[in-house]
Amino acid sequence: MLFNPAWLIVLLSLVPLVTSANEELMYMPDPRTADASILMLSFAQRTGLDSDRPPRRYLWTDAFAVCNYLGLARATGEQRYKELALRLIDQVHHVLGRYRDDDPRSGWISGLSAQDGETHPTRGGLRIGKQLPERGESEPFNERLEWERDGQYFHYLTKWMHSLDQISRSTGDPEFNVWARELAVTAYDAFTYLPSPDGTPSMYWKMSIDLTRPLVPSMGQHDPIDGYITAMQLRATVAGLSQSIDNPDLEKAIRRFADMTNVANLTSPDPLGIGGLLVDAYRVTQLIEQGGLSDEDLLEHLLTAALAGLEYYAQSGELRAPAESRLAFRELGLAIGLHAVDHMWLSVAENHTTISPGVNTKLEALMRYVPLGDEIESFWRTPAHQDTSTWTEHQDINEVMLATRLAPDGFLVLALPDK
């Protein structure tokens, strides 16, 4: 990494002051934590979180960022990172929970009053934060343009549920978990539907900002399993908090997501999808250890699908392509997932968890790919590879996910709720 003046500020803030020979020496956190700090402080300045610049919010990136700030607060002991996480949550709700400035509609997208919207900021879901407004009802579908248009994505909403829940687990404050569950119920009601008389449920991939119409009617491959695991996580957190609010109830959503999950169709060649399966597998591992879930078969299905996709992807040659033809954030999603594999392996060993032979075999096979995460990380930390349009055009998401790879625990580890 090239010299950055911010390095000096971060390093000076982390170097301990030793006032006597008898005082215990405190060590600076891992240099990777310092690198992640630089990236996240720069992100805060650049996107108007910690500067006078207009807020530039994007739900996927911000969900990872909240978790990164939590992890940095835990690793460094510095309160400012927790403050940035809380400030980011508030800013996301007030930007992406409300209609766009160029929309003739105004206020909370839930339709709630100003006061009720403050109390229930996720009741109407949250916008993606894309640059272009959503497609109008009379406009023809354009697949290329749809990637740039606003709306709501289910898999972005689940990431935000996770980040809110991580705040509750870190602080013991149930309000964030309540907001996450309110978002879960809203997403379940809006995105799921019964397409045939036999009652087989399905999901839309993308909905309008106000959740009244589908913008992309097909179902995301991993959306049901992501919805199921996230809902189980939120329910487990409620049980672990010393003070909690039971409503809203997620049981109906949990059953419906479970019904929609096709474990035989989870394998994906996409690096971001593979990484997501591995992160989900680690969440399931932790929920099993914490008593919030008991489905070891699900864990084996996730690992099996991830391994099949990883074996294909590693042989595809995509990682030998030049930086100009690669998307860093998708590869970094896989690299984060490979951190989750390492965490799973250590967790099973340290907690002496009894796992089935099938799970153990899959974990052993996946461990052989952990160095691939280091390869991806090293490639995208190379200055020349960051000096390309594929990096600079997606700087925010690339840098935040690189920071997650460098300091992953805020995102990956489901800390036991602080009582």
Image: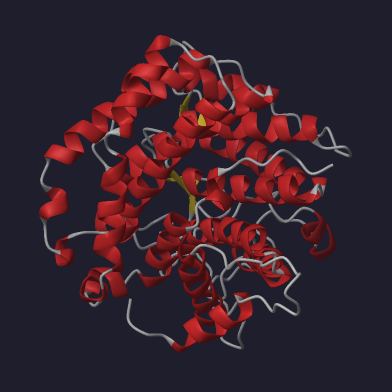
How many badges with numbers are in the image?
Answer: 0
In depth, the one of 309 and 205 nearer the eye is 309
Height in image: 196 above or below 282? above
Residue 341 location, x and y as percent?
Answer: 41, 36
- Residue 275 in the image, given as x and y percentages of width and height: 37, 41
Q: Is residue 312 left or right of residue 146?
A: left
Relative to 355, say whether 283 is above or below.
below
- Residue 50, image x, y percentages: 62, 80
Residue located at (19% from left, 39% from top): 313
Who's the residue at 68% across and 22% down the image? 291
Q: Quadrant of the N terminus?
A: bottom left
Taking the spot 70% from the left edge, 40% from the top edge, the residue there is 181
Task: Report which quarter residue 111 is drawn in.
Answer: bottom right
Q: Nearer the viewer, residue 204 or 298?
A: 298
Q: Residue at x 66, y 44 (%)?
A: 183
Q: How is the image coloured?
A: secondary structure
On the picture, is 267 further left or further right than 356? left
Decide if residue 30 is on the left or right side of residue 66: left
